[in-house]
Amino acid sequence: MTARWHTVAQARPLAAALLAMVASACAPKLQYDLPASLAVAQPSVSASAQANAMLDRYMNTRGDFHPNDLVRLSFPYFPLLDNQQRVQMSGKISPPLLDPIDVRGLSNTELQARLTDLYKTKLERPAVSISVLEYNEPPPPREVFVIGEVQKAGPMPFREGITLLEALSRAGGRTNIGDLSQVVVLTPAGDRIQAQLVDLEGILNGAPGAIGQLDPFSIVIVPSTRLARTADKAELIRSIIGFNGVNLGWSFDLLK
């Protein structure tokens, strides 16, 4: 999943209208280490658990094909090869004339491209289309989570084009100790999580940067000003993620 970005000029009219609610008065950045015994802020505990569950569902069911789904393979130039079959518990299907192929984690488009390539040595016209006729389990609902120091931590339905600023606004804006200068955005990408640190406060105040659109299943974390800063961006992101109760078991890629 690739994030898409609005220019600062495009974002400023909206930013000016929402700045009072989202970025109120800048709280001082307190510089001390977070005690190891400090618990996750209570308003965000339930939302963090829900966000973890969303990540688990997505990572365990990513892709368009899952065991016992009923799929149809259609060959427009060779209709005699058309067939329906269920995805095996191993995650494989058995396309005509080919060895079984693992479809776990693949999108429909990716599987069609792979099969078309494999059929080049088998068929003069290797076109093939795949459709899911019956899901063993319905796909998880597409959501975005905003957690941490916001007024209304929790999920919201995903819609195309939703931006980081809109999601934060729909969560009621930050609390009086929310730090918009180091917002963390987590985005599932394949079997990994992309983590990005965004200085939203700086962007809203005219600093170079862009406000990105969110992908489905993204998690936005607004940290507390109580978190100690560090020059190590990766360590800072891990501290913010851990303090807000998000599962650290997934592999992370740090985006610049």
Image (tube, helix red, strand yellow):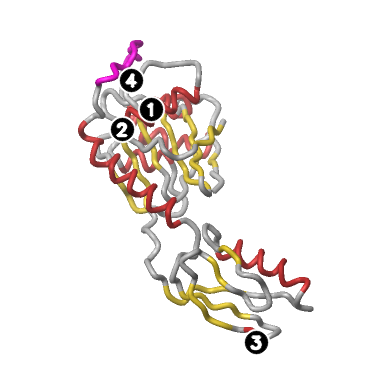
Residue under label 2, please give it: 148
Q: CA distance from mark 2 to mark 3?
A: 54 Å
Q: Nearer the viewer, mark 1 or mark 2?
A: 1
Is 188 located above or below residue 130 in the figure? above
Q: Nearer the viewer, mark 1 or mark 3?
A: 3
Q: Nearer the viewer, mark 4 or mark 1?
A: 1
Residue under label 4, please give it: 225
Mark closer to the chain start, 1 or 2: 2
**Span highlighted in magenta in the image:** 27-37
Residue under label 1, please give it: 240
Residue under label 3, please give it: 79
Instruction: Say which amino acid is labelled 2.
Output: Gly
Instruction: Say which amino acid is labelled 4.
Output: Thr
Towards the viewer: 58 or 23: 58
Identify the main secondary structure in magenta: loop
Q: Secondary structure at mark 1?
A: helix
Q: CA distance from mark 4 to mark 1?
A: 11 Å
Instruction: Say which amino acid is labelled 1.
Output: Ile
Residue 18, image quadrant: top left
Callout 1–callout 2 Cβ contact below 8 Å = yes
For image coordinates 60% across by 66% down, the residue present is 101
Callout 4–callout 1 Cβ contact below 8 Å = no
Q: CA distance from mark 1 to mark 3?
A: 55 Å
